[in-house]
Image (cartoon, coloured by chain):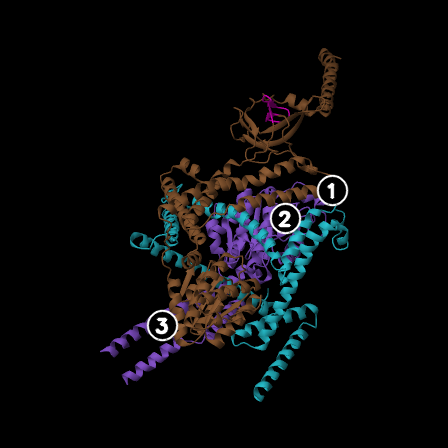
Chain colours: A cyan, B brown, C purple
Amino acid sequence: MKTGRLVSIAIFILVIAAFLFSWWRSDWSKSGLLVTTGAFLTLFILSFLYKDNPYYKFAEHLFVGVSAAYWMMMSFWNIMVPNLVAKLYPSLVGGALPALADKPPDYLFFIPMVLGIMLLMRLSPKGGWISRWALAFIVGTTAGLNLIRYLRSDFIRQIDNTMIPLVAQTDAGISFWGSFSNIVIFIGVLCGLIYFFFSKEHKGLFGGAARLGIWILMLTFGAGFGYTVMARISLLAGRMSYLFGDWLRLINQ
Amino acid sequence: MNNFCKTRLKFLPILIFLFLAGSLMAQTAEDTAEVLTEADTAEMEPQLPPPAPAKIDSVKDTPNDRGHSIDLWWSLSPDDDGTGNYVTGYEIWRFEKTETGEMDSVRRKSVPYAVGYFTDRGDKDNGQDPLPNGKDYWYRIRTIVSKTVYSDSEKFGPVQAEGQWYHTGKTPLAVAVLLFSTFTVAFIVIAGGSFDFKPFIIVPIISVTFIWIREIVLLLISGSFSFQTFILAVPFSAVGSLGLFIIAGGIGYPIGRYIHKQKGGKVDLYVRPLSGINAVDEAIGRATEMGKPILYVLGLGTAADIATICSFTVLGRVAKKVAEHQSSLIVPCYDPIVMTVAQEVVKNAYAEAGRPDTYDDDMVFFVTQSQFAYVAAVNGMMLRQLPASNFYLGLFYAESLLLAETGSLAGSIQIAGTDQVAQLPFFIVACDYTLIGEELYAASAYLSKEPILLGSLKAEDWGKSIFIFLAIVGVIAATFGWQNFIDWLAIRL
Amino acid sequence: MDNMDNSNKKSMLERLLLIDRRYVFICIALAVIIPILFHISFREIATDIVRDLYEEIDELPPGSRIMLSFDYAPTTAPEIQPMVDAIIWHAAKKNLKIYMMAVWPTGHSLIGQTIDSVLIPEFPDLVDGVDYMNLGYKAGNQGLIRVIVDDIKRMYSTDANGTDIDLIPMMKTVTSLKDMDFIVSFGGGFPGVKEWILFAGDPGNIKVGGCCTAVSAPLLYPYYPNQMVGLLGGIKGAAEYESEMIKHFPEFRRRPTPALDLMGPQTIAHIVIMFFIIFGNVMYFINRARERKLEDTGRR
């Protein structure tokens, strides 16, 4: 226990010393401080790969706190002020948004204000039921908007997109790979839909098509997995680029 | 002086005269050249004949819009060979009557050669009303060869821009919505559900109330009042509900009622077995044998998300089994509202299983609304308490693999289900059973046997059948080159 | 002796199967760091889905209006920022009128950063309000898109700098999204490219192009090519676009090409991952065959 504590203190001193050394290398500049802080926070997070530790916890809590504050600030200045306060009482925002101060008030915005207050009633144990009305308005409006859009773009237009010739023609004649691609798309769509058909048991020919459908789905998920791996590696490469380029200056950016 | 010299001398004045005359003529030509204008130059150049005029085929209001737009089509000038060597373009001229009754014209636009259509949307500069509806306009097409060489077509008109109430291009969408609604209503009623007519009356009332309040507020504040809006609020608010009510309720409801009666009131809509749901009992049994708890994660969604709502149904089933087997259940929640709903679900499940005394509110608890902090907490629970079975059913984002991996490390049997396509690969790889996308919704219908859920599932299956049928027909048509059929079948919005 | 060899082999097999994941992390880290340090990169050729997007922007006549929507966060910037820089450079080079907005709150600051890092230093002649403008962030997700398809000024009364929108020259002839010649969404999640297609592209009949993270790319393929002109998916898409830019604009080579630079570590890391996948599967099947053999021996 005592040894463990000594090691922890030694590591802490080492981290502080390394931080100061890195900052000194950038001549105690402000940008150097920011880069050094970013680099160290990155290393703190990456240290989780070895084991959970206080440095990782510190970086995670810092991130959670800063992002919560940032979102709150953004919501206030980009939503509340121009969309509510400036609409109901324009002269009040003259200092921050002078262009809006001359506009006439729009009292229609009392309605969304009332709905917003109703939503906040969720916090009240006795008045929580009031928020359900505002929530119903939001859910109903969203459902109504989305029904048409999704039905058009994700259903009807996809029928249109599936109507492709099984024998693809180009100026030079029949295209083998084009035809192959079209056949795969058509069979994939058909069998995938058959797999998600719940009204009939998957037996016989129907079952065979469903089996093919799940294979095609698995291929798709595999491709999706691969894409996600690419995304994560590119984020890692970006971070490494930052550490070795901006911080350690070992590479020319 | 001899005769030869005298003869030559006689010619001298003539020569001098000719020389002077030549100089003067040159001067005159130069002077004349300075004064010559473009017109003079044009006159001096070979004169191009004017082109044959274009012929306006039709000028009419642009369909399926709110107005302020007129379409023009014209046949190209016979002299337009599509190369621009002779006819270089066309000008569209619009005419309107002024207050004094005279015709005022404005050149709207120039278009290049070989173009025979134009849509006039008016002049938007300086915020002027572009092409007001209901006003008479006339049009003329000028075929251009050069600035001075052109010919005009006959004036065509009068024509007015108008708005349309119904967008004919969206008819297939309207048909699709009404078909889907009819199927849903019919199957809900077949499955034994009831069709509630109240929303069709309440929704238009609320909508009209909002519009009337708005008009009254505007009247009080700014003195402006639109009588038309006030009156039209009623039919406009009602037309959507009425249409849906007539078609979906008027057709779907009777059909569903008839079939339900024909079956003697007992209709069990078939849903094929789902491997993930069949494994639920196995997972709970395993936990009971090992004496370890069951972890149920509802995901990061809110109570309004479909995946979370479906997860509540499965949670009810799992909680009932857990109560019957006297195992323990852990339900960490991300959202406070989800927590309150989950507490009610689990409490009711324990009561149904006949063990309300064993229910404890601490089984279902709130953790945090921060994504990765939530994951860290749940991972910690998994590693400390080593649950025998983990259920991940709901809405998940990037934390899906973190949860599944940790559960795998802890040695738990894992059943997952989400409609987030991006997260499915991770669950499939790391979990024993996965409900893919719509299988999660089907699972909740399968377990609960609620008519609304079953009816919706059946309607969706019918929708898929229609999709498959249209796709097969369309592919056959596309393969054989029946483009007219595809254009008729396909949607152009 | 034979049994001992077998048990030793089995335990080595088991050890290989249960290899500590931290060794894998180290291999991945080296696979990423070494190409970065030694500037290892590979040639990229644009695929059709990327080339279609490139050609759509390239064929727009000067003065055309292009709307760029910054719908991503700094967490996905390593993937998306190279696409943003390349496309905005392309648009400025083609003398297009660039309109920028954000449906994500974090997009607001990213627009500013992009203007400061690409437009101002490389195109100093461009004037704010005349050649490009920043509408900033507005809440509403797909609801915002739904409104501005018909009327932009109902949602935006000023630009991001607080200037009255009616006083901005670029907005004089623009009343709605339908006045845009092309929309490009840089999407890192929800709302993103899909919402732009559903709520602007399809109903407004406006051409939409997508630039997204690799995670979202598979979900957007069904919309290509009828509902979405082209798609840059992840860092690979960005690298392909950069290579296409270099091919047609040699001066583009003088500026940083982060996507092409990152494809080196990307490729090597993928090869390492593929090796581990194949290795793991081979070990799994060998172990399974061995276990079956032992079971059969045990039964006899």
User: In the drawing, does residue B339 fall left or right of residue B270?
Assistant: right
* Residue reaching furthest to the left: C300
Instruction: State yes or no: residue A16 in magenta.
Output: no
Mark 1, secondary structure of its residue: helix
Mark 2, secondary structure of its residue: strand
What's under tag 3, amino acid-wise?
Answer: Met
**Residue B86 shows in this picture:** no
What's under tag 1, amino acid-wise?
Answer: Leu
Name the residue: 36% across, 79% down. C12
In percent of width and height, residue C226 lies at 48, 45
Q: How far apart are the alpha carbons under marks 2 and 3?
A: 55 Å
Q: How far apart are the alpha carbons under marks 3 and 1?
A: 80 Å
Query: From what the image shows, is residue A82 above or below residue B126?
Result: below
Chain where mark 2 sits? C
Q: Main secondary structure of the magenta part?
A: strand
User: In the drawing, does residue C95 fall left or right of residue B436?
Assistant: right
Q: Which mark is residue B220?
A: 1
Instruction: State yes or no: residue B148 in magenta.
Output: yes
Q: Which mark is residue A202?
A: none
Front residue of A248/B305: it is B305
Name the residue: 65% across, 38% down. B230
Query: From what the image shows, is residue A115 above or below residue A246?
Result: above
User: In the drawing, does residue B259 fall left or right of residue B214?
Assistant: left
Instruction: Please give the residue where the numbered disc 2 appears in the rendered image.
Output: C99
In percent of width and height, residue A171 lies at 40, 41
In percent of width and height, residue C65 lies at 61, 44
Q: Which residues are magenta?
A: B138-159
Instruction: Please give the residue where the numbered disc 3 appears in the rendered image.
Output: C283
Front residue of B483/B77: it is B483
In percent of width and height, residue C19 lies at 42, 76
Q: Earlier in the sequence, mark 2 or mark 3?
A: 2
Mark 3, secondary structure of its residue: helix
